Amino acid sequence: MTDKQRNWQEDIKFLIELQKELNSQANDCQASPRFWTVGDYKWVECLEDNAERYYVYLPSAGESYEIDSYLLDIKEDEEFEADEQTEFNEIDCEISAIEWIQKYRDEEAYLIPTKKEHFIRENTMFLTKAEAKQHIEVNHYHYTDEAHTYAMTAWRAPKVEHLVKILNEFDFQALLQDKGNTP
């Protein structure tokens, strides 16, 4: 479709509906101009004092595993010698777990303390909260179960502020009425 064939009336109707949505949606405690992104969480290395959970790194495998999951997999999938089983049953914290792993699985294994950290997903920007929410639902496989809409302010962005003000306040309906086409 070329610009000459473009249906400007449909575009104006779209702007009217967008304006209604922009002016009636929640602001999520953000100043204007605002937009929405996808917020999510990831596990990152941290200092021992801030750890919420631990990973164990196994140099022999070149892999790291969340320690509780790793121990559960061992318990479900492997056969134990008597001493090994006894000591496994005595694991009660990360320290006793790493000691057991170093003794029976990989002597160079070590713990990695981690904490959950919020971050903004790259390449996500939506004018409406509803569109951001729909994006998360449709693309859920790209995100964790904790993904959510996240409102942001376009701080000190005069052109964005001007555009949003136009979208919020311009009388698009008048453009259709001039042509005698009210929706």
Image (tube, helix red, strand yellow):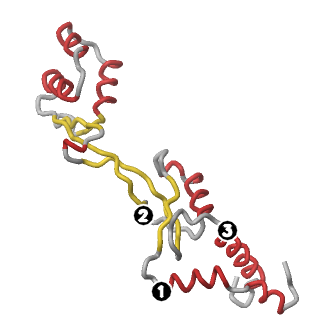
Residue at x-position 16% and y-position 37%: 59
Residue 167 location, x and y as percent? 63, 81
- In the picture provided, is 54 more to the left or to the right than 39? left
Q: At label 2, which amino acid type do we have?
A: Glu
- Crowd rating for badge 3 (residues with CA inside 10 Å; few <14, some 14–19, many 20+): few
- In the picture provided, is 89 more to the left or to the right than 16? left
Asked if disc 1 and disc 2 are in contact, CB closer than 8 Å, the reply is: no
- In the picture provided, is 138 more to the left or to the right than 12? left
Asked if disc 1 and disc 3 are in contact, CB closer than 8 Å, the reply is: no
Q: Which quadrant of the figure contains the C terminus? A: bottom right
The kind of secondary structure element at disc 2 is: loop
Residue 156 location, x and y as percent? 42, 82
Mark closer to the chain start, 2 or 3: 3
Q: Which mark is residue 158?
A: 1
Give the residue pinned by disc 2.
Answer: 122
Q: Which mark is residue 24?
A: 3
Please tell me which residue lies in front, 129 or 70. Answer: 129
Mark 1 or mark 2, whichever is nearer to me: 1
Q: At label 1, which amino acid type do we have?
A: Pro
Which of the 4 quarters of the picture holds residue 172?
A: bottom right
Q: At label 3, which amino acid type do we have?
A: Ser
Residue 65 location, x and y as percent? 28, 36
Mark closer to the chain start, 1 or 3: 3
Mark 2 or mark 3, whichever is nearer to me: 3
The kind of secondary structure element at disc 1 is: helix
Residue 149 location, x and y as percent? 52, 58
In the image, is residue 72 above or below residue 58?
above
